[in-house]
Amino acid sequence: MTKFLVFTDLHVDIMHDGVARMQVILEEAKAQDVEFIIHLGDIMYPDTGFLASHGDLENRSGWFANDRDDEKLAILKMIEESGLRVYGVLGNHDMDSCTKATACAYWGMPAPYYVFERGGLRFIALDTNNILDGETLLDYDHCNYRNFRGGNALTWLGKEQLAWLEEQIMTSSLPCVLLSHAALGDEMLNAHDGPEVWEIVRRCNADRRRVIFAMNGHNHIDGVCVRSGVPFMSVNSASNIWIGHKYDCVRYSETISKIYRHITGCAPYMNALYAVITVDDDAIRVRGVKSSFVGPSPYDLGFPRTASYHISRPCVRDRDLPLTEMEAEGLIDYE
Ligand SMILES: [Fe+2]
C-alpha cells in the first residue's frame, strides 16, 4: 500500500495567494502522513536568482507577473522544510521564462521525461510540451509556442517518447502509473498522440495489467475517462479555472487585479484543491477537496459548457477506482 498527495497548476504567477495554498497542501500532506508528493506542472516560473544562475535571465519572457521572487522562495523553503520529496512533471508554462533544462533543474527532475519507483509502483513522468513543426519535434522554450498557435502543432509526446514509454512499461516489474501535464485520456486540451498511448496501454495490458492509472493536470477540471480499460484522471488545479479575459471579473480587489493582471481571467477556487491517493490491493482511492468559486462561477459569466471536456467544478471528487479492467470506455462521471 502507498499513500501520496497530488496537486497541480498552482500558478503562483497568476494568483495572489499561491504561498497560502501551498502551505495548506503541505500541512495536509504532513497531517495525512503521505509518503511523497506529486505535482503535475504549472506550479510557478523559476525565481530570478535561479534563472540568472542558469543563463536564462537575459532572454526574459513569460505570460504572467513573474517577479514575485519572495513568493517563489517562500514556497521552495516550505517544500524543503516539509522534508517531503516532491516529484514533478513539466507543465506548458514551465518553460515560458527558460529552457527545458532549466525547468527540470528547478524541479529536481533528471530529464523532461523519466521514471521513479515509490510505494511498489513505477511512476512514468511524461513530457507533453513538444511542438510538431512539420516532421520536427521542438521543445517548448521561452514561450516559442506563441509562434505555432492554431492547428495541431502544440502538445505532443512524439514518437521517440512513445517508444520509450512502451519500453518502460514492458520492462517494469511493478504496476505503472502514467503522469503528464496535458491530458492523455480526454479529447480536449489533450496531447495529440493520446490515442497512441491508449494503443500502447492496450498492448501492454493484454497479458497482465501493467498500467493501472494515469493522471494529468493542465485543464483545471475534475473528471475521469477510461481508455483501454484504465482510468485516466484529470486532476483539478489547486487554484482556479482559466476562462479568459473575455470574462474578466474583479473578485478580490482592484489592487490585487492590478498586481496579478491575469487573475481577472480566472474563476478562482476558495480553497486549495489537491487529492490524497491511496493505492492498496483492491483499489485506487482518491480523496479530494470540495470548495466553491470566489465570485461568479464560469457558467454564471457565460463560459460555455463545451469549453471543457469535464464540467467545471470547484472540487476534486472522492472516487474509488478499480485495479481491474474497467468496462466503460471514454468519459465517465463519478459522483
Ligand atoms: Fe497547463
Image (cartoon, rainbow, N blue to C red):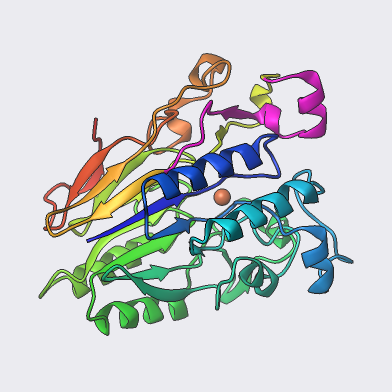
The answer to if 104 sits in the magenta stretch is: no
Horizontal and vertical percent for residue 300? Answer: 52, 14
In the displayed orientation, state which residue is furthest to the right.
58
Q: Is residue 171 above or below residue 64?
A: below
Identify the residue at image location x=33%, y=58%: 214
Identify the residue at image location x=76%, y=60%: 97
Horizontal and vertical percent for residue 73? Answer: 73, 54
User: Horizontal placement of 168 versus 282: left or right?
Assistant: right
Q: Is residue 88 above or below residue 252?
A: below
Q: Is residue 37 above or below residue 12?
A: below
* Residue 223 visible in image: yes
Identify the residue at image location x=46%, y=76%: 114
Which of these two is toward me, 213 or 50?
50
In magenta, the rendered stretch is 252-274
Which of these two is toward me, 57 or 224?
57
Identify the residue at image location x=24%, y=50%: 226
Horizontal and vertical percent for residue 190? Answer: 45, 53
Horizontal and vertical percent for residue 267? Answer: 57, 27
**Residue 15, quarter of picture:** top right
**Residue 55, quarter of picture:** bottom right
Quadrant occupied by the C terminus:
top left
